[in-house]
Image (cartoon, rainbow, N blue to C red):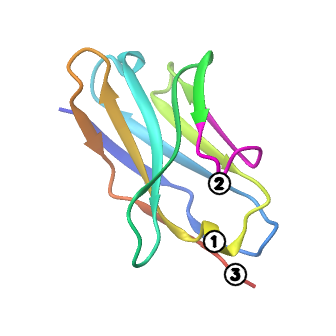
Amino acid sequence: QVQLVESGGGLVQPGGSLRLSCAFSGNFFSLYRMAWYRQAPGKQREWVAFITSPDSINYGDSVKGRFTISRDNAKNTVALQMNSLKPEDTAVYYCKATSLSSGRSYWGQGTQVTVSS
């Protein structure tokens, strides 16, 4: 069974930075595609970024050039470095793990990010 725990959310001023982390509990972390999603109040959950390997990374258009996703297979963690934050980045951020073999997905409980002056 896979469990995901996000951390690092908080309140930050526009233009600031935050680093989110997601800890993966389970087996074969390297065989999962890891992704970050976000959901703002009243809006649908939105894909932010995913990483399968350092050579396989993709970002949503709204965060490209500002956010960086990375993973540490030795520590079973995935991070999202968020720079140049905007008020429209305010949302609950979720970590998602998808098995590359079965396609089964798991979600974390989410961490709140608020960008406001």
Question: Which contiguous range is marked in magenta?
Answer: 59-70
Q: Residue at x 50, y 20 (%)?
A: 73
**84 and 71: which is toward the camera:** 84
Q: Residue at x 60, y 44 (%)?
A: 80
Marking on residue 88: 1
- Judge from the rendering whether residue 88 lies leftward or rightward of residue 110; answer left or right: right
Mark whose residue sits in front, 2 or 3 = 2
- Judge from the rendering whether residue 80 lies leftward or rightward of residue 35; answer left or right: right
- Do labels 2 and 3 touch, CB within 8 Å? no
Secondary structure at numbered mark 3: loop
Q: Which quadrant of the figure contains the N terminus?
A: top left
Q: Which residue is mark 2?
A: 62
Q: Which residue is mark 3?
A: 116
Magenta includes 63? yes
**84 and 72: which is toward the camera:** 84
- Do labels 2 and 1 touch, CB within 8 Å? yes
Q: Residue at x 35, y 34 (%)?
A: 97
Q: Is residue 88 above or below residue 105?
A: below
Q: Tell me which amino acid carries mark 2.
A: Ser
First in sequence: mark 3 vs mark 1: 1
Among the 4 quarters of the image, the one containing residue 85: bottom right
Magenta includes 95? no
Secondary structure at numbered mark 2: loop
Among the 4 quarters of the image, the one containing residue 12: bottom right
